[in-house]
Image: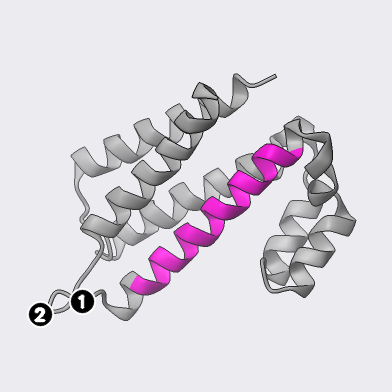
Amino acid sequence: YDTTRKIQGRINDIGLLVASTVERDDQGKYTKRGENLLDDIGNYSRLFHLFCWAKYSKKFQVLSTSRGMSRMLSRGIMSRTEYNTLTSLSSSNGGPHNACLTWILVKCLTAMKDNTLPNDHALRDLLFHKMCDLRGTFAGIG
C-alpha cells in the first residue's frame, strides 16, 4: 500500500510542479502552449501509471501487449507515433513505462527551452529528483 501511494504521490508532485509554473496570460489563465503541455504531461502520466501496473499485475498485463496497445490506439488513448514507439520497445530497453517517464521529462525540458515553463535550475533539479524518485519507487516493486 505504501509503495502505491508513493507512486501516486510522485505523479501528483510532477503535475503540481508543472501546473503551478506553466506559462499563463495576463489574466492568469493558461496559454495555449501551457494547456498543450499540461495535456501531454497528463496523458503520459496516465500511460506510465497504466504500464506500471501492467508490468506487475497479471490482470492488466494485456495492456502492455501489442493487442492492448492497439485497443488504446483505437480509443485515442495514444497517438500512432506513441503506439509505434511503445510497441517497438522490449523490457531490455526499459519498456513502455520508462518511455512514458522519458517523454514527460523531455516535454518539461523542451518547455523550459521555449519558456512555456520557467528555465530555472531549481525547477529542473526538482523535476529530475521527482522523476528519479518515481522511477526508483516503481523499480522497487516485485
- 11 in magenta: no
Give the x, y percent position of residue 32.
Answer: 33, 80
Residue 53 highlighted magenta (yes or no): yes
> Is 131 placed left or right of 123 in the picture?
right
Would you say 28 lies left or right of 38 here?
left
Q: Residue furthest left?
A: 26
| Magenta: main secondary structure | helix
For the N terminus, the image quarter is top right
Amino acid type for the residue under numbered disc 1:
Lys
> According to the image, what is the colour scheme of the structure?
one colour
Name above or below for residue 138 compared with residue 96: above
Q: Nearer the viewer, residue 102 or 140?
A: 140
Distance Cα–Cα, label 1 vs label 2: 7 Å
Q: Position of residue 114 (x, y in %)?
A: 29, 65
Where 37 falls versus 55 (above or below)?
below
The residue drawn where x is 24% and y is 64% is 115
Q: Assign a secondary structure to mark 1.
A: loop
- Type of residue at label 2? Asp
Residue position marked by numbered label 2 in the rendering: 26
In the picture, the quarter occupied by the C terminus is: top right
Residue 52 against residue 15 in the figure, above or below:
above
Please report the bounds of the magenta region as a residue range.
35-54
The residue lying at 28 percent from left, 49 percent from top is 17
Percent position (x, y) of residue 127?
Answer: 34, 40
Q: Residue furthest front?
A: 1
- Dividing the picture into quadrants, the one containing residue 76 is bottom right
Is residue 88 something that shows in the picture? Answer: no
The residue that disc 1 covers is 29
- Secondary structure under the numbered disc 2 in the rendered image: loop
